[in-house]
């Protein structure tokens, strides 16, 4: 069957235990609600900021600096961003910038962390509201959210420019671990190294084609966006069919 036709695979179907806690394999450990399979226990943590904001005003100032950096990244590219540009765009002193960031690299890291956090938050919200009838719906929503953030989250392209956040367990992308755990919880797809590898490869392929779509066209070249879904679907159908069938039989 041609994946472009949009037909959903027959197995495995979603299991009716979405509210049950499951074991999360990250640093936090212990049972967590389903939504944290995407968010994780540390989704609100900033790691690239020199001074953590302790008050709402400080947090707003930090967000204003990152908003300014995001605009510059979209206009000029991340390679040309400087701390002085960030200060001028945000209407702040250079000292204010250095209070939070030691250099331009730290600004870019913090912007990327915020973008990744917002992706996870949007993905979790979308997963909660979407009709996830089959495993492919989870992947489709993940791609849809990525596309949406390229369109409405300033500076989101910086996510693609940096190395992916890798799990300490096996070096696979952290998002692959989160999606694998969600598939296991909702659809019974056994979460193992092979599944995480295939998901990591598939999501990397999808992210690359989506990024390319927005490099070619600020609105997103629809041909590349369509190919992203097609290629990812074909790849996962090919490599996960046996695992999906085994999960369904179990």
Image: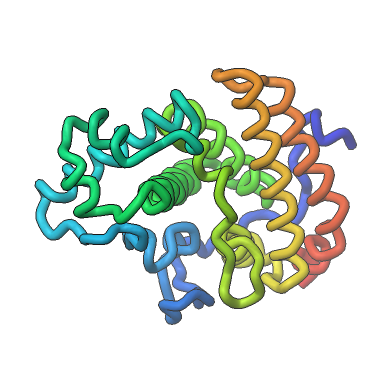
Relative side of 209 to 132, left or right: right
Residue furthest to the bottom: 30
The structure residue drawn at horizontal position 62% and vertical position 34%, both measured from the top left corner, is 211
The structure residue drawn at horizontal position 46% and vertical position 45%, both measured from the top left corner, is 119
Q: How many marks?
A: 0
Residue 128 shows up from this direction = no
Residue 208 % position (x, y): 68, 40
Please state which of residues 82 and 72 is positioned toward the viewer in this rendering.
Answer: 82
Q: Residue 40, relative to residue 70: is it above or below?
A: below
Please state which of residues 139 and 117 is positioned toward the viewer in this rendering.
Answer: 117
Q: Quadrant of the C terminus?
A: bottom right
Location of residue 193 by image quarter: bottom right
Residue 83 % position (x, y): 32, 41
The structure residue drawn at horizontal position 57% and vertical position 69%, both measured from the top left corner, is 167
Residue 74 shows up from this direction = yes
Please state which of residues 29 and 66 is positioned toward the viewer in this rendering.
Answer: 66
């Amino acid at each position: 069957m041609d994946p472009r036709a949009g037909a959903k695979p027959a197995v495995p179907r979603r299991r009716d235990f979405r509210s049950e806690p499951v074991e999360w394999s990250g640093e936090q450990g212990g049972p967590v609600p389903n939504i944290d399979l995407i968010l994780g226990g540390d989704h609100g943590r900033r790691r690239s900021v020199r001074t953590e904001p302790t008050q709402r005003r400080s947090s707003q100032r930090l967000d204003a600096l990152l908003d300014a950096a995001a605009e510059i990244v979209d206009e000029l590219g991340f390679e040309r961003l400087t701390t002085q540009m960030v200060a001028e765009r945000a209407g702040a002193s250079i000292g204010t910038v250095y209070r939070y960031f030691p250099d331009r690299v730290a600004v870019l890291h913090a912007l990327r962390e915020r973008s990744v956090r917002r992706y996870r938050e949007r993905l979790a919200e979308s997963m909660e509201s979407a009709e996830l009838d089959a495993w492919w719906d989870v992947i489709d929503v993940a791609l849809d959210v990525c596309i949406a953030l390229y369109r409405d989250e300033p500076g989101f392209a910086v996510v693609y420019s940096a190395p992916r956040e890798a799990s300490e367990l096996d070096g696979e992308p952290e998002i692959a671990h989160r999606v694998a755990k969600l598939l296991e919880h909702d659809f019974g797809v056994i979460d193992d190294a092979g599944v995480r590898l295939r998901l990591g490869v598939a999501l990397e392929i999808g992210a690359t084609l989506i990024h390319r779509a927005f490099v070619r066209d600020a609105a997103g070249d629809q041909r590349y966006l369509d190919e992203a879904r097609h290629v990812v679907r074909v790849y996962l159908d090919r490599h996960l069919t046996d695992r999906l069938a085994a999960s369904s039989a179990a």
